[in-house]
Image (tube, rainbow, N blue to C red):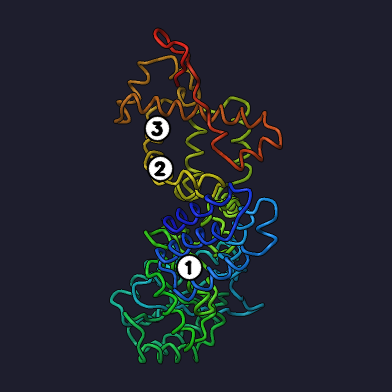
Amino acid sequence: MAFDSLSSRLQMAMRRITGKGKLNETDIDEMMREVRLSLLEADVNLKVIRQFTNNVKEKALGQKILSGLNPGQQVVKIVFDELKRVMGDETVGISYKASGLTTIMTVGLQGTGKTTAIGKLGAFIRKTEKKKVMFIAADIYRPAAIDQLMTLGKQLDIFVYQEGLIKAQTIVKNGLKYAKDNLYDVVIIDTAGRLNIDAEMMQELIDVKEIAKPDEILLTVDAMTGQVAATVAQSFHEQLNTTGAIITKLDGDTRGGAALSIREISQIPIKFASNGEKMDAFEVFHPERMASRILGMGDVLTLIESATQNIDEDEAMDMMEKMMSGTYNYNDLLKQFKMIKRMGSISKILGFIPGVGKYKDALNNVDDKQFEKMSVIIHSMTEAERKNPKLIEDSSRRRTRIANGAGVQVADVNRLRQALDQQKQMAKQMSKMSESDMKNVQKDPSKLMPQPKMKKGKGKNKGQFRF
């Protein structure tokens, strides 16, 4: 996942100083050496690294930090603020026209995921802004580019204006007229990309810009290209005056250098992040939240937003009431799986929770297919068994029949029983918690997990305990 290596190294550097009651210049120098190495490994632009480390060191060596209470935590706050500043300080959205047609022109090199990003952007605008969206297919050079956009349009139920392989300028001019005549709110233009920046490509984009007079020119950049993305962004900005960037492939094995370099080098704000194959794997880029994720502080706001967008409030309240009352059953567990699936991968969701970042290796091993497997097991039960879990608890024959029907082992059925039991235990535990208990769980969610019981050993060395 994005930033894994950078996040691990930065968190390690921070941990070395947070436990110290006092800090001296040697402590700061050692931390800055680790920070510098982590940024180099993440393929961050050298100019950005120099500025970043100089700013952090200058503030960290201030007399207030070294002599104040909790100096380690104050230094972490300085690093957090600097990460946020490098990525843009504030969240920048799309500037929509108060009335009439808002035109968005997308540009970028070939292979950056531009056409897919257009599909995601269109779906995002329609869902969050409730606007009528149209695409214009003006990429006339890349093989099957028009077909790809048409397929996305059909999948999303968004109209695509296209005229085949004629001049891009003509397509854009006619497409904009069509959008105005049919009262569309937003039009997104897919322009041609090239394998590298050349004069011919730029001239065509300048011509299209002249015709479209776009409200936004969004550049798609591939997160996996590291600091090269910043150089590309600077070139596009100098000639087209781009208004923002969409950073793509953030879900890949990327080192994070692009996100930390683009704003500082090109002065283009990152407006959106694309982080998966699905059309809803697209989000507004919040520098503050991203800095929090990198430092392992979680991202509760994004988690709440995702839950709000994907989970019906009444449905969630009904589920919680059933869990608290002890009537929670396998039908409810199946509904819960579906709710979670709508929010994205499990490892991604858990990554938003403060304190869970330190279990990174465990998160990376979370297999979403296990939820599919558990769903198959539940579907192998009778309706009576789903409604009354005790029937399965009390009968090994039922468990064997369910396992055979689902094509799994009895041990898998038993694991599902444990999952249901743990949900009930966690709900019961939460219902008894005070406000201070809830705050402690926010800092360390592992406290909410059922703890293994301690058993006293027998025979030799029986005074010892085992789990």
Disc tally is 3
Secondary structure of the residue carrying numbered label 2 = loop
Residue 237 disc label = none
Question: Nearest the camera: 366 or 75?
Answer: 75
Q: Position of residue 252 (x, y in %)?
A: 38, 59
Q: Say which residue label 2 marks.
A: 366
Are there few (<14), some (14-19), or many (20+) residues within 10 Å of tag 2? some
Q: Secondary structure at mark 1?
A: helix
Residue that carries the numbered disc 3 in the rendered image: 379
Please provide percent x and percent y for residue 44.
Answer: 44, 69
Residue lying at the far top of the rendered structure: 459
Q: Which residue is mark 1?
A: 259
First in sequence: mark 2 or mark 1?
Answer: 1
Gap in angstroms between the C-alphas marked 2 and 1: 26 Å
Q: Residues within 10 Å of mark 3 (few under 14, many from 20)?
A: some
How far separated are the C-alphas under marks 3 and 1? 43 Å
Tell which tag, 2 or 3, sits nearer the viewer: 2
Is the residue 414 above or below the residue 28 in the image?
above
Distance in Å between CA atoms under marks 2 and 3: 22 Å
**Amino acid type at image mark 2:** Val
Q: Position of residue 220 (x, y in %)?
A: 44, 73
Q: Amino acid at mark 1?
A: Ala
Which numbered disc flags the more N-terminal residue, 3 or 1? 1
